[in-house]
Amino acid sequence: MGEDRVEWIIFVVLGTWLILSALGTVFVKSPIHVILFFLSTLLAMAAIFLVLGAELLAGIQLIIYAVAIVVFYVLVITTIPWEKIKRFEGIYKSELMVASPILFILFLLMSYMVVKGEFAQPVGLVKDNVKDLGKELFTSYLFPFEVASVILLVAMIGAILLGRKEE
Amino acid sequence: MDIMKAYIILSIALFLIGFLGVIVRKNLITILVSTELMLNGINLALVAADKVLGRVDGQIFAFFVLTVAAAEVAVGLGLVISIFRLKGYEASHEISQLRD
């Protein structure tokens, strides 16, 4: 019972942190503050991954998301002149009025399904997360792993093509 | 209630918050950030399912989601920059055509 309660306390703390930062990401006005709230969301996600026993994924979340992607966003934001984007900061009010009740009802429906549903039976036991993950990734999922490198190469070429100046 | 169901519900909430951000934000860059929130919600659901089942397949899928997220950020921000360069600095409702 005691261990269970500790799990719930950790869940409530991390979940509140995650949801508050996600709401901040959506509703805060300035793009720099949006990026900071997004960084806070990513840190909360990494902590939740650690709690759920996905250590390798937590580290990769920190390295790829919290370093590479966030720095990419900040670099792009610094190239944009501030006085010109003041005009379209913020959110659409009428769309918010229409969308938020619909999405809330959708959330209630999906949560009801999850609460009423049953989980599948466990089929295995992960002893060493990183070892099992690496073994599975380089045996069963070797071909998708190689294809992922092609996806990254294509994305790199596309970004260079899109980002260069027209002659 | 099982705590893993609470994690699944948390991932649904994160996904829908990101979806709301895609709908309501005016700035193109913050729309991209909201899609990242949606991808994070999916990752959380995959990892929670892994914890329930005692497997690692869901985490491998989460790796591929991360790969797609990195590719999406590179191409998406390239598109945003080229839209800004082509048409000036406009809100998302003013961009209604792809050509000049």
Image (cartoon, rainbow, N blue to C red):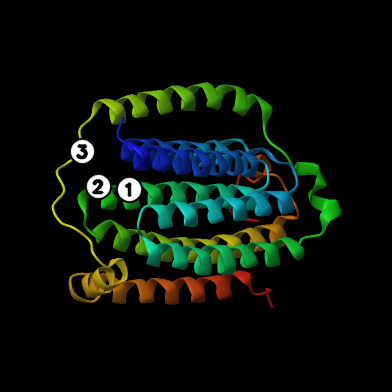
View extreme (right): residue: A83
Residue B62, by quadrant, is: bottom left
Residue at image position (63%, 49%) is B30
- The image quadrant where one finds the N terminus of chain A is top left
Label 3, on which residue?
A119
User: To which chain does the residue with label 3 belong?
Assistant: A
Q: How would you rate the neighbour count of disc 1 (Cα within 10 Å): few for under 14, some for 14-19, many for 20 or more? A: many
Position of A46 with respect to A54 (left or right) is right
Amino acid at the residue labelled 3: Phe
Query: Can you identify the residue that label 2 sits on?
Result: B52
Check chain identity for marks 1 and 2: say if they share one: yes
Q: Which residue is mark 1?
A: B48
Give the amino acid at mark 2. Answer: Val
Q: Are marks 1 and 2 in contact (CB under 8 Å)?
A: yes
Q: Residue at x 43, y 73 (%)?
A: A152
User: Under tag 3, what secondary structure?
Assistant: loop
The span from disc 3 to disc 1 (Cα, nearest Å) is: 11 Å
Query: Which percent across, then down, holds residue B41?
Result: 43, 46
Please name whichever residue, A141 or B74, is drawn nearer the observer in this view of the structure.
A141
Q: Chain of mark 1?
A: B
Q: Outermost residue, front direction? A: A2
Vertical relation: A29 (above or below) A160? above
Question: What residue is shown at x 57% (from left), y 43% (from top)?
Answer: A17
Q: Which mark is residue A1?
A: none
Same subunit, labels 2 and 3: the answer reads no
Judge whether B5 appears above or below A123 on screen.
Answer: above
Out of B40 and A92, give the one closest to the viewer.
Answer: B40
Whether label 2 touches label 3, CB < 8 Å: yes
Q: Chain of mark 2?
A: B
